[in-house]
Image (spheres, grey):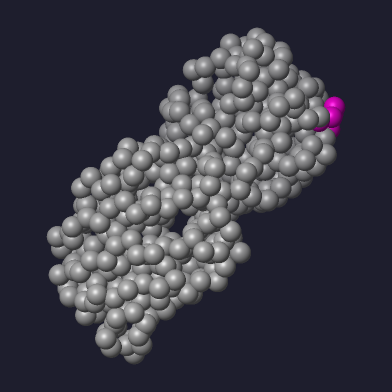
Amino acid sequence: MSLIYPLGPAGSVNIGSAAAAGATWTATDNPAEGASGSTVTFTSAALGATDPSRGTIVVVSTESVVATSVTVGGFAMTKVIEESTAISSLQIWAAFTDTLGTTANIVVSGSGTMTAPKILVGRFTGISVVTTVTSAVNTGGADPATITATVPTGGFGIAAITTNPTTTGTWSNATVDYRVNTSSSKTVSLSHTSTVGSQTPSYAGLSGGISHMVMACFAPTAPYTAQGVRFASTQLVASSLSGMADGQKGIISFWFKFVGGDGNFQVLFEGRLQCFSLFRDTANKWNFTLLAPGGGVALNFVGTTTYSSSMTQWVHFLSSWDLGGSGAASFYVNDMVNTTPSFTGGLTLNYLDTDTNVDFGARNSIAIPMNCDIADFYFNTTEFLDFNNPSHRRRFIDGTGKPVDLGATGATPTGTAPMILFKGPVASWHTNKGTGGGFSIASGSLSASATNP
């Protein structure tokens, strides 16, 4: 069973997505034990060779206080599995690091002073989903200590152990990557296996000592094709969206390729009273506006690039905002930062206007229609992701610039399905797979685009 980031059935986690020919694993660094503290920096840890699908796995062992966060190159990592007590912990953390160099600072933080902080580092490519995670504690001194998990076809399993007291033990059913002793008289060791199926790595040589073990199994990234559809005088309409409410957060993501109507105003998506509106203007640039209750502009941006029927490639549009407090917002095109949206922090967004109709592909009564191919349109009105963090962008666009599967309901990127998700086969593309429901074809028809992103 696969499990999406960050919530879902216990046992796995999706850390993003990236394209690659196959899954690989390489141990890359065994930094010296860090000094005690609430924040411990391991400087210039080796991440291994760069790759569009490269990610980093960090095994973390601490005493006295459990680690609560880990960053690599300034970007937050995802905790995959933890075995902990009130005074010690063993964890596996993971993140995509395709935009970083071959080394980066890894920072481990806790709620108090962590003693004997130790990390072990490895590099993966070609995986996006942790299919199985498990932990085991051996207080009875059984020798060997064992742990069991299922390795998926084409993937690999990572197993780690801490022993008390120190040991010179050996792994079976797994290949050792590192084994090192800490100042707290413990041994920390990392191993891996690519043997498919239920696997039971074991560590012998405990001599009656106590051990903690964790294991995570990683699946290879499956190929994904985002189906494009042609909008040409086509209008989708929802009389209302179930659960739509005013708020402060949002995410929008889609792929586009204009095929006509150069120099003409074209509306992709808007509330009937333009409380939210996304359109291409007569200068062939994207405009996006969100209004506050009462009509004032809460957020707006105008793109810097022109898009017309001369486009030969699909382009990805990605933006997120949170107007709580002082506010935050970003806008990325093809994984590159674009115009910073202007916004007013503290305002509420008027997602639910007095006229609840929502139009897609054209303004009401097929006015100013799109002449454009669209794929995988996603609109979330309750979540925010900081897209300045590349691992968050990898949930929508992979490291090679290709689409990422957002899941059947669009819940994969955040753990919550969005208000609107259009994707899938042409015949049912217009059926909203998000939580809002409600859309039907009011005018025209949809056909397959000549190409897909």
Q: Position of residue 294 (x, y in %)?
A: 56, 34
The image quarter containing residue 369 is top right
Which residue appears at 58% of the width and 59% of the height?
153
Q: Nearer the viewer, residue 238 or 201?
A: 201
Q: Position of residue 60 (x, y in %)?
A: 30, 62
Q: Which part of the image, by quadrant, shows the N terminus?
A: bottom right
Q: Position of residue 374 (x, y in %)?
A: 69, 30
Residue 241 relative to residue 221: left or right: right
Q: Which part of the image, by quadrant, shows the C terminus?
A: top right
Q: Nearer the viewer, residue 361 or 170?
A: 170
Q: Position of residue 26 (x, y in %)?
A: 38, 52
111 w.r.t. 265: above or below? below
Q: Is residue 363 visible?
A: no
Q: Nearer the viewer, residue 450 or 285?
A: 450
Which residue appears at 38% of the width and 58% of the height?
93
The image quarter containing residue 252 is top right
Q: Which SS type dominates the magenta stretch? A: loop
167 w.r.t. 422: above or below? below
Magenta region, residue range: 442-446
429 w.r.t. 77: above or below? above
Q: Give the number of marks.
A: 0
Q: Is residue 48 visible?
A: yes
Which residue appears at 78% of the width and 30% of the height?
448
Residue 444 in the magenta stretch? The answer is: yes
Which residue appears at 39% of the width and 64% of the height?
175
Q: Nearer the viewer, residue 311 or 130?
A: 130
Residue 24 in the magenta stretch? The answer is: no
Residue 291 relative to residue 91: left or right: right
